[in-house]
């Protein structure tokens, strides 16, 4: 009988030691459960400016511009692919900091809605004067016309040139 009590005492002692060592190591246990199957699918998505991934937009400019001069031109943005997308004009980056330029952008209903002088007409969205602009959610395989305006600021040096880079961001929508 004494052996039975010694065996039981040893078992209790071992159990207490195991429990204490588990608590001292802060071991925790978690349960897990499987949920229903989910499928994530990506699609093809391209943003094209003027029909190209790298569009050299030479029409956005002018000669003999002075402070206060405005250049305004339409740019067709196409969303091509098989997935719903939201996109936005993330930033406009001039290549030269010495020529002060400010930018505005609108989405207009047609190329005619962005005349080379005067205010845009048939405005769908905008104007945006701070970038990143609000995101546009558009159907697959559609185009929009952006009317972009650059205004030459005070203090622009004579005989200087600058070019700009338009940076767009696109996000797939589920």
Image: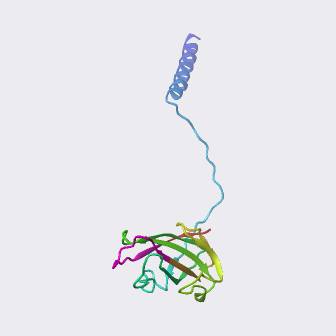
Snapshot quadrant of residue 64: bottom left
Residue 152 in the magenta stretch? The answer is yes
The prevailing secondary structure element of the residues shown in magenta is loop
Measuring 42% from the left and 79% from the top, which residue is drawn there?
66
- The image shows residue 83 at horizontal and vertical percentages of 59, 75
Q: Is residue 161 left or right of residue 59?
A: left
The furthest residue to the top: 2
How many numbered markers are drawn?
Answer: 0
Residue 32 position (above or below residue 134): above
Measuring 56% from the left and 80% from the top, which residue is drawn there?
146
**Which residue occupies the foreground of this view, 127 or 39?**
127
**Which residue occupies the foreground of this view, 133 or 120?**
120
Snapshot quadrant of residue 81: bottom right
- The image shows residue 6 at horizontal and vertical percentages of 54, 14
- Provide the residue span drawn in magenta: 150-167
Residue 42 in the magenta stretch? The answer is no
Residue 81 position (above or below residue 90): below
**Which residue occupies the foreground of this view, 101 or 11?**
101
Say which quadrant the N terminus sits in: top right
Measuring 52% from the left and 78% from the top, which residue is drawn there?
149
Query: Can you see residue 80?
Result: no
């Amino acid at each position: 009988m004494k052996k039975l009590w010694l065996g039981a005492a040893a078992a209790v002692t071992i159990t207490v030691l195991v429990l204490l060592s588990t608590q001292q190591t802060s071991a925790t246990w978690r349960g897990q459960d499987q949920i229903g199957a989910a499928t994530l699918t990506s699609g093809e998505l391209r943003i094209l400016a003027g029909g190209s991934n790298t569009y050299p937009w030479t029409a956005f400019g002018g000669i003999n511009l002075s402070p206060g001069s405005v250049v305004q031109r339409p740019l067709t943005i196409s969303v091509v692919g098989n997935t719903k997308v939201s996109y936005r004009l993330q930033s406009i980056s001039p290549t030269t900091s010495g020529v002060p330029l400010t930018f505005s952008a609108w989405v207009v209903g047609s190329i005619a809605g962005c005349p080379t002088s005067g205010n845009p007409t048939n405005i769908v969205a905008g104007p945006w004067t701070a970038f990143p602009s609000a995101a546009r959610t558009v159907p697959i395989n559609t185009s929009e016309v952006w009317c972009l305006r650059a205004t030459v600021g005070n203090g622009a040096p004579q005989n200087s040139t600058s070019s700009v880079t338009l940076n767009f961001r696109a996000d797939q929508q589920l």
